[in-house]
């Protein structure tokens, strides 16, 4: 089955003929309650006629469009709403391929989204982005690609990645098609503010191509540099964690994205910009950024986020706007997606019960019924990644326990040591200065602290660094290693036992990517063979393996919510305050920007 979407211009003759009643509709939905996100109304007794992949007619009576071959769906007692859109998502972070992601989210009512493939871009560059784009085009999703802006995220002086992208590569990607829609989140916001040639060049290439620029600004919203960032043409930002963050962005003409991912719960605070401060919500968007396969299975996707927003006091119709028309308008594609209006793509969901429950029972994508009652009804074409992408872990040598020993500049005594503090359900960390003992020239770790290490895995340089982290919670000897380590995706290892840390690192290296948790009772492995980021297994298998990692971490004492998602960010060298890369500890602050710092103060 082909899910190819045709441009509106190519569909006009058939749409007009169907709307007149001269050509039978391919699909008709009758007698439902229409969620009109354009007007903000719920309209009773409405019907929708579809011709091919687009909507031909919306009204009380569409009987004139029904012919002998028309498929009819009775929507009596149900809501008819536009398919949900995710305005900021990295599919790789769901641990799934695009096809399996589509299989997971279509039954939940997500029919499209705007996907920033900067995870695979940091491993394979433009080649990785193109592979995912090709796979997207074979699914029913209204999928739009954003070109990774920060590869590497913080610069080659701070981390080693598998590729590097600049203005020329960004411009090339826009020649691939109109579904390459935007420049992905510009994480190097200091570079934009202070005129870095590479970042300014990427933005200029984007604007000249008529595309959009997405933001990632983590300095306080009151900082004088936010308007500077906006002046560069950045018109959307998902790094909103307070109501003030949303308010300031909206006032500057930006779209404020409010996220409810697996491990970052920002909607409850940010949504008060509307519910308490009264701001017009039309420049507010609901996004995931991101949800693991496990949380997709257990909680849902955009349906979960919309339901959560409603539980925070948002009117249901407004919550649907935040996940449909607002998102489409932000990226300039509201003519095609985001509403149930004549000419739009027939991306439609039917919902049972109370609208606030967001209980999706039928999903229609591009005019095809693809899912019913939580199950896919359409077969999706298989997609195979080349062998190169399945062999992406290139360590100079396998780590050994001695690699995790931290040698101190003194033989004995106490040393002031920088420690990364994890904050549950938040992307940022804190920097702690802790006095740690030294014995025989070796730093001693205790009192609930763990070691954290990064080994370069793209070019076999042998780069490695070791630091200290607080907040993991291990109450027994344990270690976790992963090749999902945003955004450079080197091998990240965390633990309180050097031998187990070495074994965990070896396990993911030998699997050519994945996550491994090792304790005294055994090894739990979640293979991620595709670029070391995505599972080659079906959604259901990947979700079970992801859940097994969570269970193993919990049993070892790590009770962080969706711990793997939080821990995988500890190498992200552009989010405050203290991180670690293969080149050492990285500190990010509004006063000093991004800089490498020593472990010992």
Image: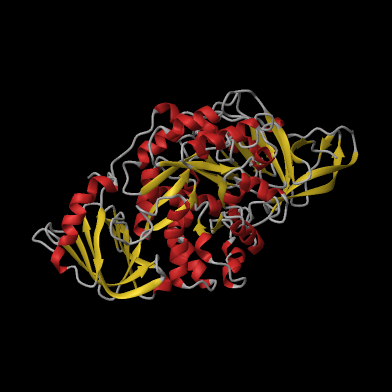
Measuring from the top left, give residue 257's x and y in whole percent. 55, 56
Q: Is residue 121 left or right of residue 461?
A: left
Relative to 103, 263 lies left or right: right
The furthest residue to the right: 413
Q: Residue at x 65, y 24 (%)?
A: 462
Residue 362 seen by the camera: yes
Q: Is 129 located above or below residue 49 in the figure?
A: above
Q: How many marks?
A: 0
- Image point 72% across, 56% down: which residue? 222
Residue 107 quadrant: bottom left
Nearest the eye: 593 or 41: 41
Residue at horizontal 87 percent and vertical 32 percent from the top: 409
Q: Is residue 433 found left or right of 310 in the rendered image?
A: right
Q: Residue at x 40, y 27 (%)?
A: 387
471 and 277: which is toward the camera: 277
Residue 538 at least partly seen:
no
Quadrant in which the N terminus is drawn: top left
351 or 28: nearer the viewer: 28
Image height check: is 189 above or below 85? above
| Residue 306 coordinates in the image, percent (x, y) | 47, 65
Q: Is residue 174 above or below residue 106?
A: above
**Residue 186 x, y percent position in the rendering:** 59, 42
* Quadrant (top left/top right/bottom left/bottom right) for the C terminus: top right
């Amino acid at each position: 089955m082909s899910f190819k979407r045709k441009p509106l211009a190519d569909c006009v003759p058939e749409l007009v003929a169907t709307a007149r009643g001269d050509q039978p509709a391919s699909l008709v939905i009758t007698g439902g309650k229409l969620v009109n996100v354009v007007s903000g109304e719920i309209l009773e007794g409405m019907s929708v006629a579809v011709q091919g992949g687009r909507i031909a007619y919306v009204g009380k009576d569409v009987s004139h469009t029904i012919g002998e071959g028309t498929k009819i769906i009775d929507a009596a007692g149900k809501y008819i709403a536009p398919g949900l859109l995710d305005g900021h998502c990295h599919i790789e972070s769901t641990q799934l391929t695009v096809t399996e992601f589509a299989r997971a989210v279509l039954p939940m009512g997500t029919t499209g989204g705007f996907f920033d493939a900067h995870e695979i871009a940091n491993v394979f560059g433009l080649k990785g982005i193109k592979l995912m784009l090709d796979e997207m085009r074979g699914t029913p999703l209204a999928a739009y690609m954003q070109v990774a802006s920060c590869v590497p995220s913080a610069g080659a002086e701070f981390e080693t990645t598998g590729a590097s992208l600049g203005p020329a590569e960004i411009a090339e990607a826009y020649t691939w098609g109109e579904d390459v829609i935007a420049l992905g989140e510009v994480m190097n916001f200091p570079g934009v503010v202070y005129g870095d040639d590479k970042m300014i060049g990427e933005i200029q290439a984007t604007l000249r191509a008529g595309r959009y620029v997405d933001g990632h600004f983590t300095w306080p919203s009151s900082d004088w540099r936010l308007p500077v960032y906006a002046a560069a043409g950045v018109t959307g930002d998902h790094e909103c964690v307070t109501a003030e963050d949303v308010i300031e962005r909206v006032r500057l003409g930006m779209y404020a994205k409010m996220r409810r991912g697996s491990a970052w719960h920002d909607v409850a605070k940010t949504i008060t910009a509307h519910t308490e401060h009264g701001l017009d919500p039309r420049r507010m968007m609901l996004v995931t950024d991101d949800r693991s396969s496990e949380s997709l299975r257990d909680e849902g996707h955009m349906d979960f986020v919309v339901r959560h927003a409603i539980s925070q006091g948002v009117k249901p119709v407004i919550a649907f706007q935040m996940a449909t028309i607002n998102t489409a308008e932000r990226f300039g594609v509201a003519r095609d997606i985001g509403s149930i209006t004549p000419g739009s793509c027939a991306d439609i969901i039917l919902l049972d019960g109370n609208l606030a429950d967001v209980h999706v029972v039928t999903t229609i994508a591009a005019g095809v019924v693809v899912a019913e009652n939580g199950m896919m009804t359409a077969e999706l074409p298989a997609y195979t990644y080349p062998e190169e992408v399945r062999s992406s872990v290139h360590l100079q040598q396998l780590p050994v326990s001695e690699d995790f020993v931290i040698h101190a500049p003194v033989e004995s005594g106490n040393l002031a040591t920088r420690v990364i503090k994890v904050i549950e359900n938040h992307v940022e960390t804190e920097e702690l200065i802790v006095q740690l003992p030294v014995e025989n020239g070796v730093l001693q770790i205790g009192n609930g602290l763990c070691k954290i290490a990064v080994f370069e895995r793209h070019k076999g340089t042998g780069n490695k660094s070791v630091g200290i982290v607080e907040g993991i919670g291990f109450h027994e000897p344990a270690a976790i290693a992963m090749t999902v380590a945003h955004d450079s995706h080197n091998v990240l290892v965390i633990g309180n036992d050097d031998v187990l840390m070495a074994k965990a690192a070896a396990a993911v290296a030998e699997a050519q990517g994945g996550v491994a948790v090792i304790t005294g009772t055994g090894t739990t492995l979640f293979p991620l063979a595709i670029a070391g980021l995505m599972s080659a297994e079906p959604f259901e298998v990947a979700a079970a393996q992801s859940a097994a990692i969570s269970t193993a971490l919990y049993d070892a004492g790590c009770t962080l919510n969706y711990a793997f998602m939080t821990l995988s960010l500890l190498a992200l060298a552009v989010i405050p305050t203290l991180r670690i890369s293969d080149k050492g500890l990285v500190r990010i602050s509004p006063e000093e920007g991004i800089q490498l710092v020593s472990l010992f103060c």
